[in-house]
Amino acid sequence: MSVRLETIRECLEGIIPGHIATCDADGVPNLAYLSQVQYIDNDHVALSYQFFNRTRQNVLAGSPVCLLLTSHLNGAQYRLKLHFLRSETAGPLFEQMKAKLAGIASHTGMSGVFRLLGSDIYRVLAIEQVAGAVAALPPPPINHLSALRQATQRLAACNNLHCLLETALDALAEGFGIGQVMLLMLDEGRGRLYTLASRGYPQSGVGSEIAVGEGVVGICARERTPIRIGFMSSEYAYGRTVRDSVAAAGDADALESAIPLPGLPDASSQLAVPICAVDRLIGVLYVESVANLHFGYNDEDALVAFAAQLGLAILHHQQFEEQADDEPAGEDCPPSPAGPPLAVRHFAPNDSVFLDDDYLIKGVAGAILWALLSDFVERRRTSFTNKSLRVDARIRLPDFADNLEARLVLLQRRLAERGAGIELAKTGRGRFSLRVERPLLLVEG
Amino acid sequence: MLDSDHLAFILSGVSISLASVAAGADPRPTMSRGLGCKALDGGRRLAVFVRRSQSADLLANVGSSGRVANVFSLPSNNRTLQLKGSDARVLPFAASDLPIVERHVADLLREVLPLGLSEAVVRALFEHPADDLVSVVYTPDAAFSQTPGPQAGVCLPRPA
């Protein structure tokens, strides 16, 4: 029985480098070491094209190609016969390989030397295991299929978005042993992703942002493809990406960094997986570790499957909240709060809101908060529905993919973390209440 | 003839790979791991040791074309050298060469264990039963630096 490529993917990680043999038109053989083999499917792999070397010249001239790959887990060796198909210089596969190569280059002291010029795609014609003893396989750290089953079952038990987010992150932490995880939602209109939930960081970072296209998370979002790096790479380091983008934007966008991204400063392994549903990108699931090569193909597979379930569930819960289960009860008139007033300042151009001069939130969530607080101050209103926000001209929700419920969760969490005496609480399907514990002084501009 | 620097390098704890092609229109390149090597005639020729059970196609190719490509790479610093030859022959393994193979595997273990590989894995990979070993002997007629980078593939001064 021939070997299925999906069962030997650890050989592609390059921990023990692969070898490639080709020959020129005159029959002169050539051997080279590979820095990267990328699994595409059981019949296809991609090799990185970094230099126009003899191997590539031979391949382009039609040479048969033989790879020798070795498993670092048990020492098993495999020979693969390949047939070159084409090269890609942009797109999901290219970005996956470019990111991975940056990590490998950094790890092997080859930063600035290794640069991906193309992803060369090959058809796998045959796989042969080389004779010889193999070591006993170490027990895998987790059973991915079992962990995935349990995690998706837990998602199915959630009845609102808040519960879904908490459960999703708990399931990843407990079921997959992932110490650091972030869930970021796409703000399609602004081309940015905002952190909605996280685990494993000193600060939650809820509300922090990264642009689509920047860093591992941003490239994952732009290409809608998993990005996985096994070694620390300054090129893909979070902190640097954010610093650079802030510097490029100048002071005008200083708010972008007002809430720091929670990422590990010394992450070696990074994996970002797109959360998609009904052909739309909803957000990104990002996990990281200080250990080298912490996430493998099986982790990537499991998280992609988990993200597919999560995406549909997020979409469902957002749509579910669009309808209130009953009309809000008559406007209650809570007693006027006492104590020192809280100054709430709103800047209309970007809907940023500051509490006592400290930045809280901006954008759609900022506009929502300002409308809620204005209604509270003017009419003592405390009960609201998602439906009423959707038609509220002050909030100017974008027509498409506004993720209203996710923005309410974001706002609720930012308020809870600030602890300034303003709280949002869910009171039913599509309904929530506002609680204000201090007199408010609303200031526009 | 290989210079003393290259000779010392290929006799250190390098990873060794040997490739060959069949003569004719269907070259079928293939390769095997080398388990050590030895300089002959003061460095004019090399003997590379491979396992017969792992190398049926490779040995058939050597017998067919005599053409080999032989790469030596030091895992700890990526220094890599490729030698080529066109007069390769398959010869029986001399039992007196077993200490060379054993020393090579020991040197290689010292190289790769600090990189995090399991000793059981490396020992399995470089198992070398004497009755399964065979020598491929050739005269290097070209040498190329293949240390990763834009200079990879640069032809080194022709061996004398």
Image (cartoon, coloured by chain):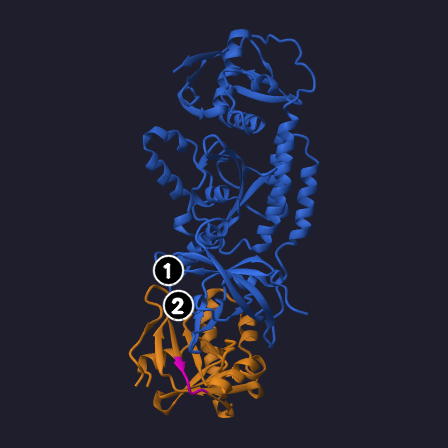
Chain colours: A blue, B orange
The quadrant of the picture occupied by the C terminus of chain B is bottom left
Residue A1 locus on image (x, y percent): 68, 70
B57 horizontally vs A87: left or right: right
Category of crowding for the residue at label 1, using alpha-carbon neighbours closer than 10 angstroms: few (below 14), some (14–19), many (at least 20): some
Category of crowding for the residue at label 2, using alpha-carbon neighbours closer than 10 angstroms: few (below 14), some (14–19), many (at least 20): some
Which amino acid type is marked by label 1? Met
The quadrant of the picture occupied by the N terminus of chain B is bottom left
According to the picture, the residue beneath numbered tag 2 turns out to be B78
Give the extent of the magenta segment: B84-88
Q: Is residue B14 visible?
A: no
Residue A255 locus on image (x, y percent): 39, 29
Residue B133 is tagged as: none
Quadrant in the picture for residue A334 = top right
**Looking at the image, is A75 positioned above or below residue B130?**
above
Q: Is residue A221 visible?
A: yes
Residue A405 locus on image (x, y percent): 58, 27
Tell me what residue is drawn at x 62 percent, y 9 percent. Answer: A332
According to the picture, the residue beneath numbered tag 1 turns out to be A110
* Magenta-colored stretch includes residue A354: no
